[in-house]
Image (cartoon, rainbow, N blue to C red):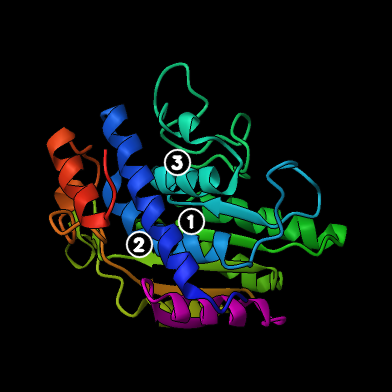
Amino acid sequence: MNSNHTDTVSMANQMRQLCLKAISRAGSGHPGGSLSLADLLAVLYFGGYLNIRPEDPRFKDRDRVVLSKGHACPILYSALALKGFISVDDLMTLRQSTSFLQGHPDMKHTPGIDMSTGSLGQGISAACGIALGLKRQGIKAHVWAFLGDGELDEGEVWEALSFASAYGLSNLTVVLDWNGLQIDGPNKEVMNLGNVKERFEVCGLECVEIDGHDHEAIAAAYDRALSCHTSPFGIIARTVKGKGVSFMENQVGWHGKAPDAQCLEKALCELGGRL
């Protein structure tokens, strides 16, 4: 919808910086899968695709975003901070005992969070339920569900996708952050799922495969998803774990490790930011 992709690239870069600062300050979190998701969320939140209101986060007709890969919430929180749902100061309380920003999304206490997630594989099922509920109530809102590739090992994901097709959930878009790594190593070594796009299509989704860091390709895929009125839509986004920080890219060790001050400074330097 927004033809100026320079803006969304800038927002993705800012999101990455804020995300890493928050994780470093917390001393725990998941930088790798957060950074791989940054571009996909930046285009969604800052490219004109969402009907949302920071001043009224729960209004009935809003579009919904479900982060099925809930451990990547620092990058989602960063988008919410830049969008005005929470403050940057709030973001820097990530994972602290007095904070409403938990290590996984909490819909009861965090503005802009539509579903509590964390147990991998379950978020997509919740997204299907939300989409079906909206459809039956006649609410013209769209549901965006973001999955990690590691959680595709869960059988529940494939049941949910088949459910989405069977119930004609054309108001649901499933975006797969396919960075090729999960906590135990490369996906192909942990559980090789073969051609994932074909598996999505077998479940009844119309589907495209894109470069998940190419903002024009992301926007084109989102436009196509919103114009699909016959079935749920799937976007297989090929990404790089730790994208944007050279020493984190494609390194499984950065799945769930917080950068110390020295690593943070180096990362921010690469991203054009500062402490």
Let me know if residue 202 appears in the view.
no
Q: In the figure, is residue 162 to the left or right of 184?
A: right
Q: Are marks 3 and 1 in contact (CB under 8 Å)?
A: no
Quadrant hosting residue 225: bottom right
Let me know if residue 132 appears in the view.
yes
Q: Residue at x 66, y 54 (%)?
A: 64
Q: Nearer the viewer, residue 82 or 164?
A: 82
Q: Residue at x 45, y 81 (%)?
A: 217
| Residue 264 in picture, x, y percent from top left | 20, 41
Q: In the figure, is residue 146 to the left or right of 275?
A: right
Q: CA distance from mark 2 to mark 3?
A: 14 Å
For label 3, the crowd category at 10 Å Cα-Cα, with few meaning under 14, some 14 to 19 and many 20 or more, is: some
Q: Provide the residue designation for mark 3.
A: 118
Q: Nearer the viewer, residue 9 or 190?
A: 9
| Residue 184 lies in the magenta-colored region | no
86 is higher (above) or lower (below) than 250: above
Which mark, residue 156?
1
Q: Which residues are magenta?
A: 207-231
| Residue 142 in picture, x, y percent from top left | 69, 64
Q: Provide the residue designation for mark 2.
A: 149
- Farthest residue in the top direction? 98
Q: CA distance from mark 3 to mark 1?
A: 14 Å
Q: Are marks 2 and 1 in contact (CB under 8 Å)?
A: no
Mark 1: secondary structure:
helix
Q: Quadrant of the C terminus?
A: top left
